Amino acid sequence: MALGWRGNYLRYKDFFLNTLLIYRKRPDLKMFLEASLSLITILVFLLFALRPTLITIATLVREIKGKEELVAGLDQKIANLDAAEVVYSQEEQRINRVREAVPVSPEPDVFLRQIEGLSQTTSAQVLGVSLGETTLVGKTPEKNKKRESKSLPEGASSLPFSISVTADFATLSRFLTEFKSLRRPIVIDAAGMNSSQTPEGVTLTLVISARTPYIEMKKEQ
């Protein structure tokens, strides 16, 4: 074992000594080796010195790419909102009509104005309008919804009312036809007509019990 180690030592010793003699005798080789070692040293130091900078640059590049994607997504959302605004502007009148037809609350004042306008256009005399129990503020109790759910869409509540109108038969017939064609839909539960004798002649009175629906908007939790 010792002889093997000594043999290797002598062989590598002669190799390094011969290389050193060549290095000293040849200036061009000496210059090449020194330049190579200097370049390797500079590269090693540059690598360690530039590594944090390179890592920082790579991180910034990733962040810039992520922000560019975010900006692109925001630009797309803005474009979608602009398109939606254009569509809304084109359909605004229809949307308002739908809101008037099926409001999100009972709105009895608006409904009574429609009845008043119908009375004026048909020349029928409204003797009285009575409104049933309804929830003006807050959520409609479930028991009331179940009671009102007949002939109504799912999730809809209703404003119950009764109305009595007097006029001649032709006027009452016209009133009833246009009453069923109001912008706000009507569900008629019962209707009856009676007559009475007056000095002016026979007077007809139309009595209607009905409901008009509305759909409450559900608030997100």
Image: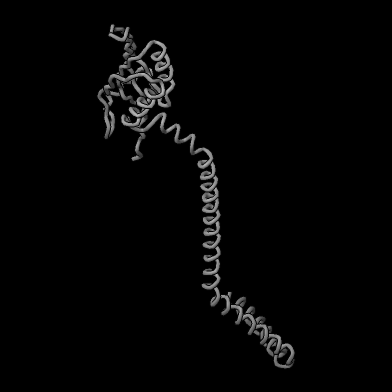
**In the rendered image, the vertical position of residue 67 relative to residue 44, given as above or below:** above
Residue drawn at 36 percent across, 33 percent down: 104
Q: Hey, which quadrant is residue 219 in on the image?
A: top left
Report the residue that reaches farthest toward the front: 199
**Looking at the rendering, in which quadrant would you find the C terminus?**
top left
**In the rendered image, the vertical position of residue 67 relative to residue 17, given as above or below:** above
Residue drawn at 36 percent across, 39 percent down: 220
Residue 103 horizontal/vertical position (percent): 38, 32
Residue drawn at 45 percent across, 32 percent down: 97
Report the residue that reaches farthest toward the left: 133
Residue 160 horizontal/vertical position (percent): 30, 22
Q: Hey, which quadrant is residue 32 in on the image?
A: bottom right
Task: Please name whichever residue, 109 or 69, is drawn nearer the observer in this view of the structure.
Answer: 109
Residue 85 horizontal/vertical position (percent): 51, 45
Task: Please name whichever residue, 6 or 145, is drawn nearer the observer in this view of the structure.
Answer: 145
Residue 128 in the figure: left or right of residue 215:
left
**In the rendered image, the vertical position of residue 12 relative to residue 95, given as above or below:** below
Task: Please name whichever residue, 184 or 177, is drawn nearer the observer in this view of the structure.
Answer: 177
Residue drawn at 64 percent across, 82 percent down: 39
**Looking at the rendering, in which quadrant would you find the N terminus?**
bottom right
Task: Please name whichever residue, 139 or 197, is drawn nearer the observer in this view of the structure.
Answer: 197
Which color scheme is applied? one colour
Q: Please tell me how many numbered marks the rendered image carries.
A: 0
Residue 207 horizontal/vertical position (percent): 31, 14
Residue 68 in the figure: left or right of residue 11:
left
Residue 47 in the figure: left or right of residue 137:
right
